[in-house]
Amino acid sequence: MDFQRHHLRTPLTLTRFLLLLVSAIILAWWSSGCFKIDYYTHNDALLSFSKDTLRFDTVFTDVGSATRSIRIRNPYDQFVRISRIALERGDASKFRINVDGVSYPDGIAENVEIWPKDSIWVFVEVTIDPDEPFSVSPFIIDESLQIETNGNQQTVILEAWGQNANYIPNNQFKGKLAVLSCNLEQESWDDPRPYVLYGALFIDSCTLHLPAGTRIYVHGGIARNDLGIYNDGLIWTLSQGRIVSEGTVDEPVIIQGDRLEPEFADVPGQWGGIRLGAGSKGNVFKYTTIKNSIVGIRADSASSLTLANVRIYNNANVGLLGERSSIQATNSLFYNQGAQSVAFTYGGNYQFDYCTIASYGNTTDGVYMDNFRCLNDDCSSVTIYRLIASWRNCIITGSGTDELNMVDATSGKEPFAWEVMFANCVVRVKDLLDDYPNFLSQCRDCVENKEYTDPLFVNIDMAQYQLDTLSIAQDKAKPLPGITADIDDQPRDNMPDIGCYERKE
């Protein structure tokens, strides 16, 4: 039996010996310089990736982790040395990386080699606590994985969902277009969790109902598709779609960007905005705040919109833009826009009652109105559409000497094309009077805001547009049937104040 056991062990010992011998020969060959590593060293080195974006599509209801992977391939016939594979935020990142089986707690891997026509795997892990504050765990946690080769940097985007929310249309839609349709019925976003819009949402053959307390946070940014490059984060109603937002004074509807950290509170241009497409009828916003977009609301041709107790502010361009549309606004506040607070182009039908337009800190007019559209580049040829605009009990002011700009393409020769009326308004105008010398006499019972120092608001710098104790707007409005309270549901007396706020003693 001993001989038999010895006999059975012999092949294993011989195999081990041969392996050691071959290994020794290879090692000697390598160390003697017979095997030379040839690196691709040109600065045009471009590696290929299995994905350009890693999305962690799990919505965590409590603390959890998820792992995704990406393959990096060397397309060359030579070795490639990657100088560094690094997380943008390093060890402060929510993400962690493992490169071909080696973990890097500081988020940086250096001098990683890939054999010719070969590849490596990078594993990325993220841990989410949805109960952390937004400053630590925002709705969408994004950063980049940076890969540098021969001085050439490539990037893979990392995205994870940091809060427990409703992600609309879903977690995969950045830079994509989705359609919400409900066969001409109504869809209500009544979940107590917030709604995070990711991509562009088109509403067609559907009424999107937003009950009191609904919060919509829109993830914006630059996106690209087959149609070109555009600003992501859009809500767009088509001809048979509409939005009905029904907030209350205690539970307003909020529509804004998804960055809720304090440093982003006043940053404009975080998302695209709301667009009411041509023919979209019956859009209503009550007790609703719309902020931090590029254009707050744009109402296209033949669309209709009602605003009541609405705040539109901190937008990069126009706050409210109407093009041959129909808009009725009551007890609403427009301020801190990058361009006009309110603009009407190519005519339309507009009625504004008890509204405040405060255009401070920019060089454009607070309100702009015209009744034409240019047909060529130099606007030497135009087409005209009738403008009907009524302004009652409104404040139109700002830091410029003129906060109202009007252009009647007919120069008053066609009265039917220009029907504009102001009554009991505070207006800040100067150069406008050159083109409309009778404006102040035709502005019935209006108050001219001649000087920037005229007492008007509590604190402009703090965006407190309630009326000052000595405000020139106090007790100067005319009571209007059916409007008995202000933007905050404070009752108006029988000598109401101009603007969206009724002063409280």
Image (spheres, helix red, strand yellow):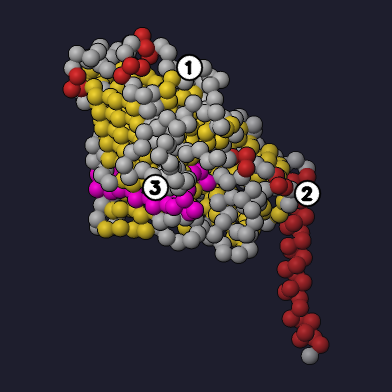
> What's the CA distance linking mark 3 and mark 1?
33 Å
Where residue 229 appears, x then y in whole percent?
41, 34
Q: Quadrant of residue 469?
A: top right
Q: Which mark is residue 286?
A: 3
292 or 149: nearer the viewer:
292
**SS assignment at label 3:** strand
Residue 249 in magenta stretch: yes
Part of the protein shown in magenta: 237-258
Q: Residues within 10 Å of mark 3 (few under 14, many from 20)?
A: many
Q: What residue is rendered at 42% in x and 22% in y?
A: 447
- Rendered residue at 30%/30% (across/down): 390
In the depicted structure, whether residue 472 falls above or below residue 110:
above
- The span from disc 2 to disc 3 (Cα, nearest Å) is 81 Å
**Which residue in the structure is indicated by mark 2?**
28
Q: Is residue 117 placed above or below 372 in the rendered structure? A: below
The amino acid marked with disc number 3 is Lys
* Quadrant assignment for the N terminus: bottom right
Residue 88 in view in this figure: yes
Q: Mark 2–mark 1 contact, CB under 8 Å?
A: no
Which residue was labeled with disc 1? 450
Instruction: Kindly tell me whether residue 355 is visible in this rendering.
Output: no
